[in-house]
Amino acid sequence: MDISVVIPLYNEVESLPELTSWINKVMIENRFSYEIILVDDGSNDGSWEMIRKLSQANQFIEGIRFRRNYGKSAALNVGFAAAEGNVVITMDADLQDSPDEIPELYRRITEEKYDLISGWKAKRHDPISKTVPTKLFNTVTRRMSGIHNLHDFNCGLKAYRKAVVKNIEVYGEMHRYIPVLAKWAGFTKIGEQIVEHHPRKYGVTKFGMIRFINGFLDLLSIFFVGKFAKRPMHFFGSMGVLSFLTGFVSIIWIISEKLYHINVLHDDNYRDATENPLFYIALVAIIVGFQLFLTGFVAELVSRNAPERNNYQIDEKI
């Protein structure tokens, strides 16, 4: 099969007939073998009934339904597991992503051998309350991930080589950081394509301002897990040692300073070490350093005994 189109959706009953018809038209014109996987994330507006009708009319349409709303990341993860196409295309169900972009995305994956192509909505039709935070997060993500050639990590329109979606796990709010997950999994040939962004035709956006907070926390989680999941002692241990040494050196300095004043300057009235505020700060640094080191040690033991401790991404076997 050439292409699997994975579409997560929540209360998009009005747009589904037009979207699937548009995708079908593109596929027929380009003679692609394909499947459309519609993942209903707990809709309550009749979307699932519409998916039933569309699937009966078109044998290439499949539906997956959640009992409740889990979020876009969960929907994508389930869709990726079900996808069978050599190239997997994701897009939103609100008709803001154009299926006309599919042939070029497919060509770049198959001919230019990219692992992942991410869409870039250079001209957006969103309110400023959505565009400004998005630009901020894209800037932070570029710096933290090292993927400097992407302008829009959160664009729903993306194309993947099949191996990519079969070797990453998407959860929480991590759907907006899939390129980062792909990079950590060893898929480093990541490109970008400017795509057309249409105004929303039906319904309203399903995402509130809380998504930006959750997204930032997930970015920190990806960064930590990607770098230190296999070696937590390197993270906690290094901070612990630094904190312990800082406190230890500070206490040595305080004691040495007191002895200098007493034995060299003969200043018997010099304040006690316990009267120096730095003494207590140094003690806290030593205690925190010791706790961080123990945390790293325990995390290392857990990591070494985890059932997936040697579960690495293997691209090919001969």
Image (cartoon, helix red, strand yellow):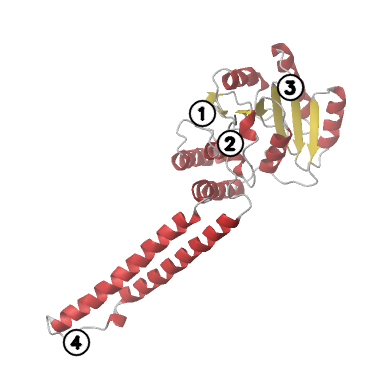
Work out whether residue 120 can be spotted: no
Find disc 1 in the rendering and name its residue.
189
Q: Which residue lies furthest to the front in this view?
A: 318
Q: Quick one: label 2 or label 4, which is nearer the N terminus?
A: 4
Compared across the picture, whether 2 is left or right of 111 comes to right
**Disc 1 secondary structure class:** loop
How far from the left and from the top, in percent, is residue 14?
78, 31
**Disc 3 secondary structure class:** strand
How far from the left and from the top, in percent, is residue 43?
78, 41
Q: Name the mark nearer the viewer: 3 or 2.
A: 2
- Residue 23 drawn above or below residue 286: above
**Disc 4 secondary structure class:** loop
Find disc 4 in the rendering and name its residue.
269
Find disc 3 in the rendering and name its residue.
34
Q: Which residue lies furthest to the left in this view?
A: 265
Q: Name the mark nearer the viewer: 1 or 4.
A: 1
Q: Name the mark nearer the viewer: 2 or 4.
A: 2
Residues under labels 2 and 4: Cα distance? Answer: 69 Å
In which quadrant of the rendered image does the C terminus lie? top right
Find disc 2 in the rendering and name its residue.
314
Residues under labels 2 and 1: Cα distance? Answer: 16 Å
Label 1 Cα neighbours within 10 Å, binned few <14 / some 14-19 / many ≥20? some
Look at label 2 and name its amino acid.
Answer: Ile
Q: Quick one: label 3 or label 2, which is nearer the N terminus?
A: 3
Look at label 3 and name its amino acid.
Answer: Tyr
Look at label 1 and name its amino acid.
Answer: Lys
Label 4 Cα neighbours within 10 Å, binned few <14 / some 14-19 / many ≥20? few
User: Is mark 2 in CB contact (under 8 Å) with mark 1?
Assistant: no
Residues under labels 3 and 1: Cα distance? Answer: 24 Å
Look at label 4 and name its amino acid.
Answer: Asn
